[in-house]
Amino acid sequence: MNIPSIDNEFFCISNIDSYILSAIVSSYINKTDVYTSMYEFSNVTDFEKEMSGNIIDKDQPSRNRAREFSLKIKNILQKINGCEYLILIGLTEEQKSYLSFTSEYNIIEIQDIKDIEFFLEPIITGKEKLSVKEEDVIRSLPYACYNNLVLQINDESSDFNLKIDKTSEVLIVIENYLRTSIVIAINYGVSIDAEIRIVPRPILNKSTVENLIEDWQNGIESAMYELKTSIYPSIEGVNFSEYKYLTFFTVHIPYSLITNNILPTTHVNLNLYPDLFIFNNIYFESNDTLRAGVVFSPEEFKDEETDLVINELNNKSLFVEKLIGKNATAINLDYLIKLFPYDLFHICSHGGEIDGYEISHNFIDRDGVSHTVQYDEVVTFSPEPGKELIKVTTKNFWRKLDGFNWGSTELKDQQYPHYVFEDMTNSSFENPDKKRINKNNVRGSSSIKCYDFHYQALFNILASGSNHPIIFNNTCNSWSRISDPFIRSGARFYIGTLWKIDNLIAKDVAEDFYKNLNKDPILNTFTDAQKHTVGNRNENIYLLWGLHFTTFRSDKTKDENQEFIIDRLLYSLFYWRTQKDKAADEPTKENIKEFIYWYAKYLASNFRDSVTERIKKSR
């Protein structure tokens, strides 16, 4: 199995919209069997600056995202021991203001084609040039990389139609998504010596895909016909039987359902940090091992896989944390997901949509223009023992703005300024007169049923913030909405379901999977386990977000793993203590206090003697 090394000679940070420049830079710096380090920086609306007190303005979400991105990039650079050249591609002055670490590296700034030629040609020698039209740059990048060529734009060139003469056991299919993430996907495909196909994006938004699958499951056969006829033209003509593994880079299309899992298949979400997703998988395979697993079940089923999963993880020497029965509460699940340093999380429960409210109200934007917004709302609760106040979580599902369906072409054609959507969001919290109408099964409200309430998965930190776990969410309808925060926050492999799964099938698949989980790729083991779904209504129900080479590796003893977990928990406790007084606002400080309390309580409840012994030795 070809797992590439990570290039630390060149390290690229590219503007999300600079995909042409990024592709040309990639053609210069690409190397055989090496993953080109390129990371996509989303647009920001303001420079880095500290706001006084608890002031939160319209640019705060953008600043928070940029700060989070900068921190993640800094951590990656530390993991790979830095780089020789840090290449900034198409970055704005606002974006650059967040990159506090750039003074430590040799910087190459690329803003146009002339910069590429001026800065890179003296460094990269021995490559001939391939002239292509600008519209052919993305399609020609795989050919250029595999033939050691650099791309140059010449709009007088003939249309690109050169074929790559190569065979591979891996096929990478990439939707033609005009963002830097498409270049990142191509760079990954080249690094593993895969055959690469760039295909048109199906014209289906996420909600439409989800609704068609639900309608099909409710007996409307025409829904599956519509889904397949909308997606299949993008992949017709591909002879999948020539390959051993298949990975789709997509925004939200469940291709394995359309191809009937003809090959062991994974997906990578082009909208959810595919750059970090790829890095975390490659880095883990070469540098880390699994230490801990979490098993969650409120024991909703008479016959379920929970006991076997716990036993198998114990047999594989992992430290296993259990949230079972009455302990499987929403608040406990939330803390474990965010703060415990696990490498695998198994979820056995009911899932899917929950009841909520239908809401419609008017609001006036900052320009004084009146709008009407329609949305659904779900509300969940997370009581915590010993605390008088109960956490209340509210999640909105936007349906229409001024009569235009959410996510539709018609709504995009209105070209509303971004602040209209900010004002809309704020109005949903500030309007005390909005009227709620009860609504059953709010579409898109994927959740996890806990012992007490439902869990909506509204988090942005996962597995203590430093681990990149495998998630097996063996609940219903767990492939899409509820998978997003797990993947966005750093999961490197996620298994979910496309519709409501039969309990006994879910149990059989999970038990087969964990019994046979070894150092082989997870994809192979799970593909074999899916034999239990063949020939019944659950066929093709599972969807995998991941890479084909990801493995389950645990090569430490149980005692070593436990000691490692204690050390990580202590580190997290002391880290958050140092961060408390640095918090920019009171809500952040209160969240950090909760983290500190949870770590202290967990350590005292589970490892009091070990922690005491460590403290004695440190004196």
Image (spheres, rainbow, N blue to C red):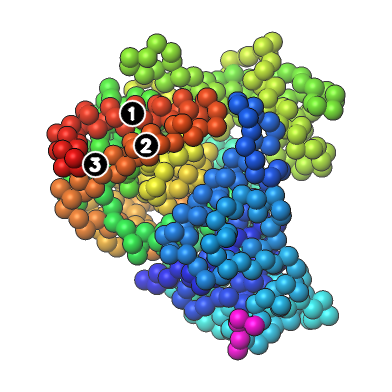
Q: Position of residue 40 (x, y in %)?
A: 60, 56
Magenta-colored stretch includes residue 124: yes
Which numbered dot is residue 339?
2
Q: Position of residue 546 (x, y in %)?
A: 44, 55
The residue under label 3 is which amino acid type?
Ile
49 vs 186, nearest the viewer: 49
Q: Which residues are magenta?
A: 122-126
Which numbered dot is residue 566?
3
Tell me: 240 left or right of 320. right
Write down the residue under mark 1.
Answer: 598
Q: Name above or below for residue 561 compared with residue 131.
A: above
The residue under label 1 is which amino acid type?
Trp
Tag 2 and tag 1, C-beta contact below 8 Å = yes
Q: Quadrant of residue 389?
A: top left
What residue is at 34 percent from the left and 37 percent from the top? 574
Q: Quadrant of the C terminus?
A: top left
Tag 3 and tag 2, C-beta contact below 8 Å = no
